[in-house]
Image (cartoon, helix red, strand yellow):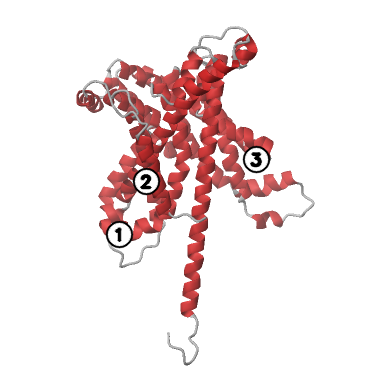
Amino acid sequence: MSLTGRHILLALVASALIALGFANLTAGGPDPWITLGRIGAGLITPDFSDYTLLANAALLTVAFAFCGVAFGATFGLLLAPFYRLRRVRLPCITIRALHEIFWALLLLNVSGLSPLTGVLAIGLPYTGIFAKVFSEYLDEAEAQAEAALPHAHSTLIRLLWVRLPACLPQIGTYTLYRLECGLRSSAVLGFIGLPTLGFHLESFFKQAHYSQAAAALFIFMALILPLRRWVRWRLVPVFIAVSIWLLSRVPYPPMGQGAALQFLNDLIPSPLRTGADWGKWLDKVLIDQALPGAIDTLTLSQLALAGATLIAAIAFPMIVPRVATRIGAAIGHGVLVIFRSTPEYMLAFVLLQILGPSMLPAILALALHNGAIIAHLLGRHAQDLTIRPDAPRGLTFWGWELFPRLTANFWALCLYRWEIILRESAIMGLLGIGTLGFYVQTNLQQLRMDRALILLAVTVLLTLLIDTLSRTLRRHMQEGRDLRIEKTRAIDDASAAPTPQGVCR
């Protein structure tokens, strides 16, 4: 079966309409305009007076990111050559299906509020991500160069001397992108107690110190926006060494003896440990928590996906000079950079202070963040297109030439972000929304590790389901596109064929 963009659009609209029936969009907070005005005043007058505190938090944010990404990249590269093996691929899929915050919540019960918790919370899921991406790069390495080596050379020699050097530029580019993601993850880990910028941002907002919160946000932007300018590969070993030194100096309350063994024991289902009734235990976990959590997670993700799709379709032409002029494109690019660089969890937290507790802040945050990412990537694709000299400008160019030529890329990017949006929707429960993250956090706070483990397994299964469905839809779209190209070529070939004598066309 071949799919087109129209089929995907209809399915997206239908799923969003169904999700609206389950969504809680009513906000019961204070007057949003008053809060918005105070936040706006804080943004205009940032307070950097406590610069020592903010500078230390910024350094630790960078340190956690560098150490976590270095951990993930190292082990991901070691696993990449073996990624085709099921016993390697399945664990990698599992560890990357859980968001960094979920990993941090689990690790808090073993290593406490220590630097190790933050590094592993970033490094473990990133290991699975790096292993998958690096394996694809190695598979795509130029086969001709490898074939030039004598057959007597071992697989290891071919890997180290041919395949790996051939894909080093791609590996470097992706690692730099993942470092940007690591900075966002590091900041967000502050919301669960680690001493990064997110910790102080949450504290300032809860105390209504919006000028200080603006200072923390501006410092984070000053770190992440020019990332590709201040990160130099020859200095990366120095960055990592300094990061390890900084994290080693972080004070933290030690965990009690036997904490790890107690944690592992608590992961065993309660009926096996205490003889409790299996029926009541399963009913409590699956019916009372997993089911409503999964419904809210899917509801939030579908509405966020629909919002991100709409934002991307509207925003991406605003960074194309032929549509928005050079000045307009520069402004549009700046706006997109801000939204795609701001962590979605951090953005949802800020919107929650304005709009009150409901799904609406999370939907807007996910839609803005992911829509900005898709729009940015589409804008880059638009710059690679060959435009005919007599092509129009403005909205006519967008509607009649630019968007039709980028439709396939547009839907592919939307489907790719679908799985990521689902992972992010699950953690929004930590803000009080009834997604799976809400029930995971509740059970972890009550030391019901067995229930939390089941809920995390449901999160992984949902993520794998959406990932599989997304890949299937993208494959069918590619097949449909290839089929249409073949038909077009066949028609062109038939039109170009010589006409037999005596036959009128």
Q: Nearer the viewer, residue 188 or 431?
A: 431
Work out whether 157 lies above or below 392.
above
- Residue sitting at 58 percent across and 32 percent down? 94
Q: Is residue 30 left or right of residue 360?
A: left
Mark-to-mark CA distance, 1 and 2 = 17 Å
Q: Is residue 139 left or right of residue 425?
A: right
Q: Nearer the viewer, residue 211 or 496?
A: 496
Q: Nearer the viewer, residue 106 or 478?
A: 478
Q: Which quarter of the figure is the C terminus placed in?
A: bottom left
- Label 3 is placed on what type of residue? Tyr
- Residue sitting at 32 percent across and 51 percent down? 317
Q: Is residue 29 left or right of residue 492?
A: left
> Mark 3 vs mark 2: which is more N-terminal?
3
* Residue beneath disc 2: 375
| Residue 292 in sight from this viewpoint | yes
- Residue sitting at 44 percent across and 46 percent down? 413
Work out whether 254 lies above or below 461.
above
* Residue beneath disc 3: 83
The location of residue 21, given as percent across then percent down, is 35, 34
- Label 1 is placed on what type of residue? Phe
The location of residue 245, given as percent across then percent down, is 53, 21
Residue 224 picture quarter = top left
Query: Under tag 1, what secondary structure?
Result: helix
Please say if the residues under marks 1 and 2 sit with CB atoms less than 8 Å apart: no
